[in-house]
Amino acid sequence: MTDEHMIEELQAEQSMFVQTAQGATSDGTTLTLNTVTPSTLYFSDRPKRVVGHMTTADFIDLWGEGENSFEEDPPNAVLAFLEPGDDAPEDAVVVIREPRLDGGQLSYSIQTLEGTVPTQTGPVTLFIDPFGRPLSPVSVAGVRRRELRRDRRRF
């Protein structure tokens, strides 16, 4: 399958992406996923409910491809993480840009939209929005923001 065909399929399915790693570090402007898994999961919501994997290297290669590419319109992402000694995960909403894969280290330039990105974490999961769909109804970051608003209204 060509990159162009893959992009069209992922856009049509409004696929979201998930990356996991054994840990992460950040200086506030860069997020590095340490010992990142070699594959990136993608999935779509109803009605298609597509689930698949691509190599993380292929995901990075697709970054600047197609109309509404991530390079052109950087995605929002939710970073779910465990800080050392925590029992429950915490999260932060970020915009991710300029991916760099070096062996088992995947780095992004980030802008924090909500929450705090820690300087060091234990296991992490990064939930990345679909191509060209920031804060849409199927957006992971959009869902997270709606949940926070609902929680605030309950008090």
Image (cartoon, grey):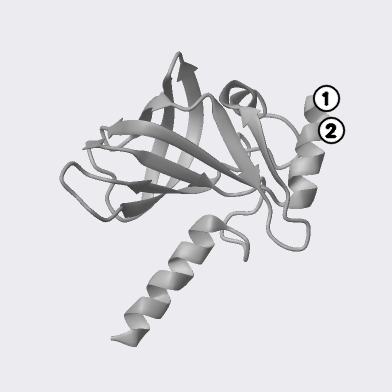
**Rendered residue at 27%/37% (across/down):** 122
Q: Which mark is residue 2?
A: 1
Determine if residue 65 is in view: yes
Quadrant hosting residue 104 = top left
Pointer 1: residues within 10 angstroms few (<14), some, or many (20+)? few
Q: Which of these two is toward me, 83 or 154? A: 83
Q: Which residue appears farthest toward the top when viewing the image?
A: 103
Question: Which part of the image, by quadrant, shows the C terminus?
Answer: bottom left
Question: Which part of the image, by quadrant, shows the N terminus?
Answer: top right
Determine if residue 63 is in view: no
Q: Are marks 1 and 2 in contact (CB under 8 Å)?
A: yes
**Rendered residue at 45%/36% (across/down):** 20
Quadrant hosting residue 53 = top right
In the rendered image of this protein, does residue 112 appear above or below residue 21?
A: below
Q: Which of these two is toward me, 120 or 27? A: 120
- Residue 42 location in percent, x, y? 63, 42
Q: Which residue is mark 2?
A: 5
- Residue 116 location in percent, x, y? 27, 50
